[in-house]
Image (spheres, grey):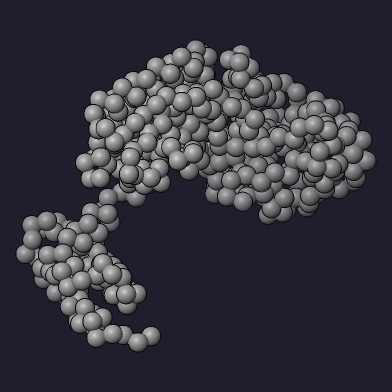
């Protein structure tokens, strides 16, 4: 690539890193910034400018390469690098369990207990009654059994880990029979067949994508069959000409041939959502009552706690799983245990659970309360008084998210914003770059904010984001 004389002159103006560091020593702004950050910031600014010059960017001029201009860029890079990468956001998407935005929010009580355990020593693995080493699982086992009706329980770091651990313990080197229609793929391209292969279980598919019968399972049982596996298709649904085998029937088949039956619930819940006019989802209690030997489900998602994988079932099988050396690699840390225990305690009183756990509160929030928040936000934005912006209430639908309740469309209310001279994409980009970021969605060139997933104290944040954007426009 031939470099023009103008480009050569601009390249000569670029300072060296030593020069930038010398300037940093003279400015109070950089006084407490680590040298590694200064070097990284200065180098990235110079490298970006060099690339822009070589690419022939029209906005690169001698003025933009002056010492003050370059040092302003360095300051911006320093601020970015010194700021935490993991930050809070405002979820205005209407997706309650939003995987990309951190899934379920913890209750106030769970956060308080988490902070208390984080700041102090605890009895994480110490039996206070005996004065000897204890099990970290014992902190939540009893309450999980109490709520679910299971004989025994344990927890690991997520449900994929729970499924893997159970398969590796029960069915390694043996066939695990599963319906072809239940070979699901979860977020991040993790697939049930892949998890099974890594566990050492031998996949034995039965039935077809849309129809699997009792006789399909029965005919597939052989001497080397180690498990009957049923996976809840919580992230998709087959409608129309479809059928599957109930867990109860699979349990009876397993009892006949003395083969363990495992159910992966995916998004486990202790709440019967049909009581709130929502779609029916099998609860953990109902699943345990079928007599399934092992059941796995998530601690976050519909349960509304921290990320965790919960395993419940027959004590004899849980004892085997607990002895598996892989358990140590999947165990929970004290902070997750603290948040999970408090979340589970809410479920001793279902009214408390609905009121205290944000995921449940958002999913069951009456439409008139969502509308009240939408009107409050509409009034806030109108009070800015900028004639370029128009806002309106809109009818919309929220989603459960997190691979849960795929057919559920929750009636909701949103606020749509249009700004003259500013495209919806530009509005979305600005809101996303605000501190904290406001994540909404675009429909028909309108920036939409769904109020079901917006917290009351976040309304002023949204107003402030729009005010800043309009000042800069």
Occupied quadrant, residue 23: bottom left
Question: Is residue 319 among what the camera can see?
Answer: no
Occupied quadrant, residue 89: top left
**Does 7 sit left or right of 272 as displayed?**
left
Tell me residue 373's x, y (percent): 38, 20
The residue at the point 23 percent across, 54 percent down is 79
Q: Nearer the viewer, residue 252 or 325?
A: 252
The residue at the point 46 percent across, 14 percent down is 368
The N terminus: image quadrant = bottom left
Q: Nearer the viewer, residue 133 or 388?
A: 388
Q: Relative to 160, is 415 above or below? A: above
Q: Relative to 423, is 240 above or below? A: above
Tell me residue 86's x, y (percent): 36, 46
Question: Is residue 9 among what the camera can see?
Answer: yes
Q: Nearer the viewer, residue 250 or 2?
A: 2
Tell me residue 417's x, y (percent): 38, 33
**Does 215 sit left or right of 163 as displayed?**
right
The residue at the point 26 percent across, 67 percent down is 59
Tell me residue 308's x, y (percent): 53, 37
**Does 81 sit left or right of 225 as displayed?**
left
């Amino acid at each position: 690539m031939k470099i023009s004389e103008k480009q050569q002159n601009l390249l000569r103006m670029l300072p060296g890193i030593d020069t930038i560091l010398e300037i940093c020593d003279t400015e109070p702004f950089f006084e407490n910034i680590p040298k590694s950050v200064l070097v990284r910031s200065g180098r990235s600014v110079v490298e970006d400018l060099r690339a822009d010059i070589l690419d022939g960017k029209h906005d690169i001029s001698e003025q933009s390469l002056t010492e003050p201009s370059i040092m302003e860029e360095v300051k911006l890079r320093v601020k970015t690098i010194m700021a935490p990468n993991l930050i809070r956001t405002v979820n205005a998407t209407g997706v309650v369990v939003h995987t990309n935005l951190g899934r379920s929010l913890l209750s106030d009580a769970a956060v308080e207990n988490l902070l208390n355990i984080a700041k102090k020593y605890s009895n994480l693995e110490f039996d206070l009654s005996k004065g000897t080493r204890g099990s970290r699982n014992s902190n939540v086992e009893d309450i999980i059994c109490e709520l679910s009706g299971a004989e025994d329980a344990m927890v690991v770091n997520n449900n994929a880990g729970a499924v893997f651990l159970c398969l590796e313990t029960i069915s390694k080197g043996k066939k695990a029979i599963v319906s072809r229609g239940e070979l699901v793929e979860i977020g991040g391209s993790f697939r049930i067949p892949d998890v099974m292969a890594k566990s050492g279980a031998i996949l034995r598919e039965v039935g077809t994508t849309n129809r699997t019968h009792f006789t399909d399972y029965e005919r597939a049982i052989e001497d080397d069959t180690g498990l009957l596996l049923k996976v809840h298709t919580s992230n998709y649904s087959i409608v129309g000409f479809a059928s599957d085998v109930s867990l109860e029937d699979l349990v009876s088949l397993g009892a006949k041939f003395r083969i363990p039956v495992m159910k992966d619930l995916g998004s486990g819940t202790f709440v019967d959502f049909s009581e709130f006019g929502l779609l029916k989802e099998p609860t953990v209690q109902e699943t345990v009552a079928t007599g399934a030997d092992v059941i796995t489900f998530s601690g976050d998602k519909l349960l509304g706690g921290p990320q965790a994988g919960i395993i419940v079932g027959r004590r004899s099988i849980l004892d085997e799983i607990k002895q598996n050396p892989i358990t140590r690699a999947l165990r929970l840390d004290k902070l997750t245990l603290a948040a999970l225990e408090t979340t589970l305690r809410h479920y001793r009183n279902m009214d408390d659970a609905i009121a205290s756990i944000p995921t449940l509160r958002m999913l069951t929030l009456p439409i008139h309360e969502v509308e009240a928040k939408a009107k409050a936000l509409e009034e806030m934005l109108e009070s800015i008084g900028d004639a370029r912006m128009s806002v309106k209430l809109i009818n919309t639908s929220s989603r459960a998210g997190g691979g849960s309740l795929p057919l559920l469309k929750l009636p909701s209310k949103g606020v749509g914003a249009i700004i003259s001279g500013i495209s919806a994409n530009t509005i979305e980009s600005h809101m996303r770059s605000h501190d904290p970021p406001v994540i909404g969605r675009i429909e028909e060139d309108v920036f939409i904010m769904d109020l079901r997933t917006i917290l009351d104290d976040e309304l002023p944040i949204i107003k402030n984001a729009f005010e800043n954007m309009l000042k800069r426009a």
